[in-house]
Image (cartoon, rainbow, N blue to C red):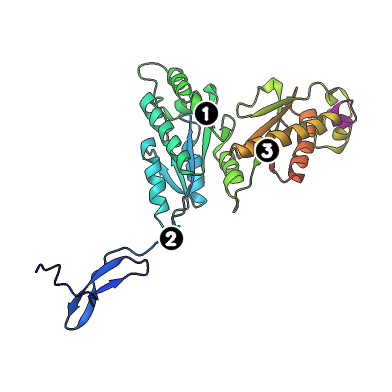
Amino acid sequence: MSEHDARPAADPARERTPAGEPHQAAQTDGAQVSTDTTPAATPEAAIPELVIISGMSGAGRSTAAKCLEDLGWFVVDNLPPALIPTMVELGARSQGNVARIAVVVDVRGRRFFDNLRESLADLDSRGVTRRIVFLESSDEALVRRFESVRRPHPLQGDGRIVDGIAAERELLRELRGDADLVIDTSSLNVHELRAKMDAQFAGDEEPELRATVMSFGFKYGLPVDADLVADMRFLPNPHWVPELRPFTGVNEEVAAYVFNQPGAKEFLDRYAELLRLIAAGYRREGKRYVTIAIGCTGGKHRSVAMSEKLAARLAAEGVETVVVHRDMGRE
């Protein structure tokens, strides 16, 4: 008779786990010692929130990362893009200790960029909530910053700083287009950049949509970080009214003058309606940030007045809104 056939029908040393899986218990001086090595059930891992910080060299990536670190984010600098999914997986295993991860990447080669694109696709397939913050700056500002620290641009090689900037801008073009938030740091100092990051990430709860309504003057150039641009130069300019010229669009008399002009109130109503439609689409696509630029000639009267009214409309509809008057006071 085989050893298997000799086994008792009811083996006292054999038990079942609550899940119904058998495990073997050893006999030691009449006592049963469980040898089950099946790991205990663990709660489902929470996937960390992820922010990817990228952009032009010299545009403030390190400052943005430091700001998130101060806000309690787990920040990893210069992580190879192929390792981003692994970093998220490790954060998910941390039992909630790493709930928010920020990764700083710079794209300096085609294969490097391909790895980033593959990693983003992997994250999307896992349902990871991820956002891309892109730091932008003008060529003039970047050249000035590199010259001030007497360092070469990482991509300039044997050429000039502007050659390296042009090469990097071309490599980053697609990533910039995919960014959820673009911040132009051309005219920002360190403290102003930190304030912008705080405004976007310091809240306890992530709102559905954040909007920045920015007034500007066309004569100073278009804001490069604007998602939408509207032109108020179809309205009469308070600059040519002597008693209004010294004031700005935040002044009640100036605002009243602007909105008493034909088409001003109609524009506000219809543009706000259009923004409701756009905002709904942004939410569906997972875009959480929008910069709406409102321009006039000098960025002092018409664009300021319209920006204030439009921001109030958006805030009343539940959109967290920040108003920035880029060029007010430059004259």
> Residue beneath label 2, please?
43
> Residue beneath label 3, please?
280
Tags 1 and 2 touching, CB below 8 Å:
no
> Residue beneath label 1, please?
176
* C-alpha span from label 1 to label 2: 37 Å
Q: Position of residue 71 (x, y in %)?
A: 52, 51
* Mark toward the viewer: 1 or 2: 2
Q: Secondary structure at mark 1?
A: helix
- Residue type highlighted by circle 1: Arg
- Residue type highlighted by circle 2: Pro
Q: Earlier in the sequence, mark 3 or mark 2?
A: 2
Q: Secondary structure at mark 2?
A: loop
Provide the residue span drawn in magenta: 257-265
Which label sits on residue 50? none
Relative to the observer, which residue lies in front, 223 or 21? 21
* Residue 316 falls within the magenta-colored stretch: no
Q: Position of residue 175 (x, y in %)?
A: 49, 29
Is 101 rendered above or below residue 231? below
* C-alpha span from label 3 to label 1: 22 Å
Q: Secondary structure at mark 3?
A: helix
